[in-house]
C-alpha cells in the first residue's frame, strides 16, 4: 500500500530521507494552503493552521515500513508529533491530493540547531522551493522570524 507524505522540514532533505526511509520515492514540490511554518521550542519544525499562509515542501511516496520508520523518527508514540491527513497542492500534476503530514504537539516557538537548520535549507534547495519561502525558513535560524 502506497502512502503520500508531505515533508516540510528536515524530511525534504534527500540524504536524510534516504537514511530514514530507503527506497521512498520523491514525487516533487507541493504546497499546503492556510498553514504556516515554525520552529518549536525544542528546535524542530512544525506547522500550524494560519489563514492565507502557505507551507511549501515536497511529496514522497512511502510504503508501510517507511511509515513506521517516520512514526518512530517523529516520536509519535511519545507524543511529540501527531500524524494527520491534509489536502496538498501537487505542483507537478497541478492537482490537490491527500497526504499525511506530521504536526508538532509543541506550539511554542524556538530556534533550530545549526545542523538541523542546515539540513532543512539543503532540502529546500534540493526541492527547489521559492526564494522568498526559503528566506522565511532561513529566518527561523537566527530568530528573526518573518
Image (cartoon, rainbow, N blue to C red):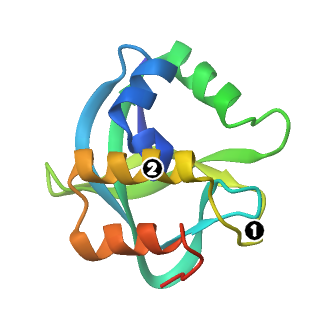
Decide if residue 96 is in sight here. yes
Residue toward you, 61 or 8: 8
Q: Which residue is mark 1?
A: 107
* Residue 66 at x, y percent in the picture: 51, 20
Mark 2 or mark 1, which is nearer to you? 2
Residue toward you, 141 or 137: 141
- Residue at far right of view: 78
Residue toward you, 33 or 107: 107
Please give the name of the residue rendered at 75% of the width and 36% of the height, measured from the top-left corner.
76
Q: Please tell me how crowded label 1 is: few (under 14), some (14-19), or many (20+) other residues with Cα within 10 Å.
A: some
Q: Please tell me how crowded label 2 is: few (under 14), some (14-19), or many (20+) other residues with Cα within 10 Å.
A: some
Q: Which residue is mark 2?
A: 118
Question: In this picture, is 59 found above or below 47?
Answer: above
* Residue 85 at x, y percent in the picture: 54, 48
In-image side of 79 versus 6 (left or right): right
Secondary element type, mark 1: loop
Please give the name of the residue rendered at 37% of the width and 28% of the height, measured from the top-left corner.
15
> Looking at the rendering, which quadrant does residue 95 occupy?
bottom left
Amino acid at each position: 500500500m502506497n502512502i503520500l507524505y508531505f515533508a516540510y522540514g528536515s524530511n525534504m532533505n534527500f540524504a536524510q530521507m534516504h537514511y530514514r526511509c530507503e527506497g521512498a520515492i520523491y514525487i516533487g514540490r507541493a504546497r499546503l494552503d492556510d498553514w504556516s511554518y515554525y520552529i518549536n521550542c525544542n528546535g524542530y519544525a512544525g506547522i500550524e493552521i494560519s489563514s492565507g499562509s502557505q507551507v511549501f515542501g515536497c511529496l514522497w511516496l512511502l510504503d508501510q515500513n517507511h511509515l513506521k520508520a517516520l512514526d518512530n523518527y517523529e516520536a509519535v508514540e511519545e507524543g511529540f508529533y501527531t500524524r494527520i491527513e491534509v489536502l496538498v497542492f501537487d505542483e507537478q500534476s497541478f492537482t490537490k491530493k491527500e497526504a499525511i503530514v506530521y504536526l508538532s504537539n509543541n506550539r511554542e516557538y524556538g530556534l533550530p540547531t545549526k545542523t538541523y537548520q542546515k539540513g532543512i535549507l539543503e532540502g529546500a534547495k534540493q526541492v527547489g522551493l521559492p526564494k522568498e519561502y526559503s528566506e522565511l525558513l532561513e529566518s527561523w535560524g537566527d530568530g528573526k522570524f518573518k
